[in-house]
């Protein structure tokens, strides 16, 4: 495949499935288990990831390092990899703005690292055709990452041009896809506050059946992920401001998702709870750790 080991930092639900695709394609994938949760360790074992003793070992062993982490941590993770003396291809596949990607590239400036801009769209990859990895940057490095995932459930797509293009496309898609959940929740909260929520849902099921507004069950999936979506909205707002576009939509969505951070990784949260959080102004439960920090 033209590479030695691949490193993944830090594999949550999405990152672990991305790593699993590289393993399925024949790569040896290493990760750092220190300080990570039992769930992360279980995923790593299930998908065949190998442990590295520390980040210096991972940096010395791997030719490609993939960063798949919450956007707020992306710059810090890049700094750790740079400090570890990594020489190879660094793929930032996080939901960050083109401006943040420029900052991340700057961390490696003057070193022996080639940075590739990556943007993942779709759910954690399990079946072909649903999840894409957009890539932009240095042609040779992009081709190397493309080859790593070619033929897997994570479909690589090359975007001609410099670093920042893949991130811009990712955020543009997320702006529509994820803000739609915040808009639906806002509409439901408004209706609930005036006693017409059931009527709104009935209307939406009739006229907008494929949208998050069509039922509270559609909203429920946003709750466990809101702690990750909130900083992503901040990145979208930053990217909008950079091109002179209004940033208020993304900033308002970030405020909405911040109301749901107490439901971090809680699969049992209901749409009704999420609506209540908006109407009451405070979380309706304290499931999860409530910190908004990346799962460890």
Image: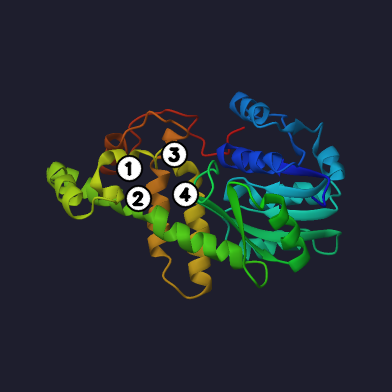
**Circles 3, 1 touching at the beta carbon (< 8 Å):** no
Q: Which mark is residue 261?
A: 3
Q: Disc 3 and disc 4: Cα gap in Å? A: 9 Å
Q: Which residue is mark 2?
A: 181
**Circles 3, 4 touching at the beta carbon (< 8 Å):** yes
Q: Disc 4 and disc 2: Cα gap in Å? A: 12 Å
User: Within 10 angstroms of label 4, few (less than 14), some, or many (20 or more) residues?
Assistant: many
Residue sitting at x 41%, y 28% = 286
Q: Disc 3 and disc 1: Cα gap in Å? A: 14 Å
Question: In the visual, does 273 lie left or right of 96?
Answer: left
Helix, strand or loop at label 2? It is helix
- Which image quarter holds the C terminus? top right
Question: In the visual, does 78 lie left or right of 18?
Answer: right
Please, is residue 75 above or below residue 106 in the view?
above
Residue 277 versus residue 43: which sits nearer the camera?
Answer: 43
The image shows residue 236 at horizontal and vertical percentages of 49, 61
Q: Which residue is mark 1?
A: 219
**Circles 2, 1 touching at the beta carbon (< 8 Å):** yes
Q: Earlier in the sequence, mark 2 or mark 3?
A: 2
Q: Earlier in the sequence, mark 3 or mark 1?
A: 1
**Is any part of residue 277 visible from this angle?**
no
Q: Which residue is mark 4?
A: 230
The image shows residue 254 at horizontal and vertical percentages of 43, 52
Please, is residue 51 above or below residue 243 in the view?
above
**Outermost front residue:** 151
**Outermost bottom residue:** 244
Front disc: 2 or 3: 2
User: Within 10 angstroms of label 2, few (less than 14), some, or many (20 or more) residues?
Assistant: many
**Is any part of residue 295 visible from this angle?**
yes
């Amino acid at each position: 495949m033209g590479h030695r080991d691949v490193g993944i930092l830090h594999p949550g639900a999405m990152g672990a499935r991305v790593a699993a695709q590289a393993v399925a394609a024949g790569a040896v994938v290493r990760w750092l288990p220190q300080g990570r949760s039992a769930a992360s360790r279980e995923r790593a074992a299930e998908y065949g990831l190998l442990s590295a003793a520390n980040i210096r070992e991972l940096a010395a062993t791997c030719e490609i390092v993939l960063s798949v982490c919450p956007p707020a941590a992306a710059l810090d993770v890049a700094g750790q990899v740079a400090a570890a003396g990594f020489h190879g291809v660094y793929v930032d596949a996080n939901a960050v703005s083109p401006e943040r990607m420029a900052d991340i590239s700057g961390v490696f400036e003057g070193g022996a690292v080639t940075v590739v801009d990556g943007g993942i769209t779709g759910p954690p990859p399990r079946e072909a055709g649903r999840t894409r990895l957009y890539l932009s940057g240095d042609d040779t490095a992009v081709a190397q990452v493309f080859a790593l995932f070619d033929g897997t459930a994570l479909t690589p797509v090359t975007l001609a041009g410099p670093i920042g293009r893949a991130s811009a496309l990712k955020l543009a898609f997320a702006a529509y896809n994820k803000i739609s959940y915040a808009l639906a929740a806002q509409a439901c909260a408004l209706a609930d506050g005036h006693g017409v929520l059931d009527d709104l849902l009935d209307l939406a099921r009739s006229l907008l059946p494929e949208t998050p507004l069509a039922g509270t069950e559609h909203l429920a999936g946003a709750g466990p992920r809101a702690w990750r979506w909130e900083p992503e909205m901040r990145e979208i707002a930053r990217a909008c401001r950079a091109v002179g576009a209004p940033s208020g939509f993304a900033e308002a969505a970030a405020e909405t998702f911040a109301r749901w951070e107490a439901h971090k990784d809680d699969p049992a949260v209901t749409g009704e709870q999420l609506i209540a959080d908006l109407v009451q102004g405070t979380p309706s439960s304290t499931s999860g750790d409530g910190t908004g920090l990346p799962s460890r």
